[in-house]
Amino acid sequence: KESGVLELLLCTPLKPAEIVRGCMIILRRRFGRALLALLVLDAVLGLAHLSQHGGWHHFREGPFWQLALCALVVAPVQAYSLARIGIYEGLAQTTSLRASFMAAWNAGLLPWISWLAVLLGLETSQRYLRIPARLTDNLAFGSWAGVQLLVCTLCLAYASCRLRWRFRSLAAQTAGTRWWKRWFPRRG
């Protein structure tokens, strides 16, 4: 929120959607190659694991192909959500560190905590109500993907709405006075 950037965001004839789209393009240019390299590394490690543990036949008969399928759906949504929520939090929070933590919380940690709560709820309902009959891998993987997608989608929708309708007011915010400056004002 440098003063020059602030003036540009407030006085530009560009629409907020164009500014956010430009930020997403910059993020893709800056981190796209690194993300692609990590995906290639994951594929190589997966192939190495398959070659050491029974190959494709063992993989197809085991429960992990379902987890891999769920991860293929969840990973792009979570990466996009992290970037878009990061743009919103960068404008909404007073410091970049707080914005980074809030984006990691909303798109990274909150879905996992929610999934653990769902699993505990399923375990409790299974124990007392006998619904479901038992927890299976399919139920665990499906609930993981569903909760991840639900939480990321809700956080993404909130951030997108705020970016669309409140962009200029978010960009116009200034950093608040630090607590020590409020408690110990400078005299003289």
Image: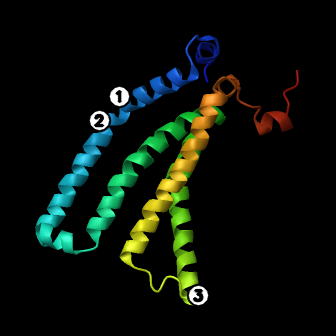
Mark 3 or 1, nearer chain start: 1
How many numbered marks, from 0 up? 3
Label 3, on which residue?
129
Residue 95 occupies quadrant: top right
Q: Name the colouring of the figure.
A: rainbow
Other residues around mark 2 within 10 Å, as few (<14) / some (14–19) / many (≥20): few
Quarter of the image containing the C terminus? Answer: top right
Q: Is residue 74 above or below residue 10?
A: below
| C-beta proximity under 8 Å, tags 3 and 2 | no
**Callout 2 amino acid:** Arg
Alpha-carbon span between mark 3 and mark 1: 51 Å
Label 2, on which residue?
33
Alpha-carbon span between mark 1 and mark 2: 7 Å
Q: Is residue 42 above or below residue 176?
A: below
Quarter of the image containing the N terminus? Answer: top right
Mark 3 or 2, nearer chain start: 2
Label 1, on which residue?
29
**Callout 3 amino acid:** Leu
| C-beta proximity under 8 Å, tags 1 and 2 | no
Q: Identify which residue is drawn at 36% across, 35% down.
A: 31
**Callout 1 amino acid:** Arg
Q: Nearer the viewer, residue 121 or 54?
A: 121
Q: Identify which residue is drawn at 57% across, 76% down.
A: 121
